[in-house]
Amino acid sequence: MGLSISSYALWMLSFTLDICLCALIFWRGANTRSPLFETYLLSQIIGVCATWLVMREFGFWSSAYYYTSWVNSGTSMLAIWLVTAELCYLGFRAYRGIWGMGWRLLLFLSVLFVLHAAHDASKATHKIAAIILVLQRDFAMASAVILVAILIIERQYDSQLDGLDRQIAIGLCVYLIAILLSDSVLIQWNVAHWPSFYGNPPSAQRQEAWWNGARFVVLNAVLAVWCFALRKPLPAPRPAPQMLPPETYGELSPAINSRLRALNARLMDFLKT
C-alpha cells in the first residue's frame, strides 16, 4: 500500500502542469525576468521525479522515501521563500531604501524561523519531519503576509510588478495559505506522536490522502491559472520610475518631520485624556 489513487492522480497532474508551465515560461521569455520562479518550478519537477524513483525502488513506507520526500518538501519551501524575495526585488528594485530594508528583514526572518523549528523539533519524536513541517508553516505564514503587503503596496503606489508577477504573487499567496492551514493541523495532531512509516498503519494513509489532497488541489488550480496567464505574449517591462532630485528631499524633509511631530503631540494628548 502506497499513495492513494486520488493523491497519485493529483501528484501526476501537478507534475504535468509544472512541465507545461516551464515550457510556457521559456517560450514567452519569462525565465530571464523571473529566474528564481523558473528555478522553483524546475525544482518541483526534479523533486517529483526523485521521490517517484525512490518510491518505485524502495517502496512508499521505506526510510529512503521518508527522507527523500521530506527533504523535497523542505527544498520546495526554500524555493518559494526565494521566489518571495524575488517578487520583493522586482517590485521595489527602483527604490533602494525599501529593498535594502526588505532583504535584511527576509534574512532575519530566515534565521529566526530556523531557530524556532529546531527548538520545536527538539521535543518531537521524528525530528526531520517536525523541523520541515514547522519551517513550512512559518515560512508559509511569513511569505503569505509579505505577498499580501506587496500586492497592497502595488495597488496603492503602482510598484514595478507587471501582470505576470502579480499573478505569481496572488497564486503563491493562495497556495501558501493552504500549506499554512494543512501544516498547522498536522503539527497540532501528529508531531509528538508521528505514525510509523514502517508499520503501514491505516491512519497514516488517511492522513497522507488528506494532507496531500488538500495541498495538491490548490496547487493544481494555481498552476492552471499561471498557465492561463502565459497564454499571450508578455508586455514589455515598464521603465523605472523617475526619482526626485536629492535637493527636493532636503526641502520636503523638514515639512514632513513637522507634520509627524504634530501628529505625535496630538496622539499623546489623546492618550492622556
Image (spheres, rainbow, N blue to C red):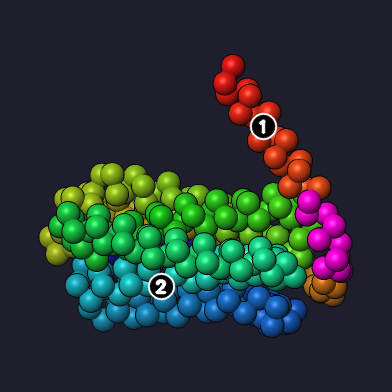
Task: Point out the image quarter for the N terminus.
Answer: bottom left
* Residue identified by numbered label 1: 265
Residue at 33% x, 72% y is 71
Task: Residue at 18%, 55% (x, y): give it.
Answer: 124
- For badge 1, the amino acid type reads Ala
Furthest residue toward top: 273
Left or right: 113 as drawn, with respect to 83: left
Q: Is residue 91 above or below residue 124?
A: below
In the image, taking residue 85 as reference, residue 30 lies left or right, namely right
Could you tell me if residue 49 is visible in this image?
Answer: yes
State the mark number for residue 75. Answer: 2
Residue lying furthest left in this view?
199
Magenta residue span: 242-254
User: Which residue lies at the image location 63% right of the left edge and 59% below the top edge?
Assistant: 169
Question: What residue do we see at 67% from left, 80% from top?
Answer: 31
Q: Is residue 108 left or right of residue 17?
A: left
| Res 262 → quadrant | top right
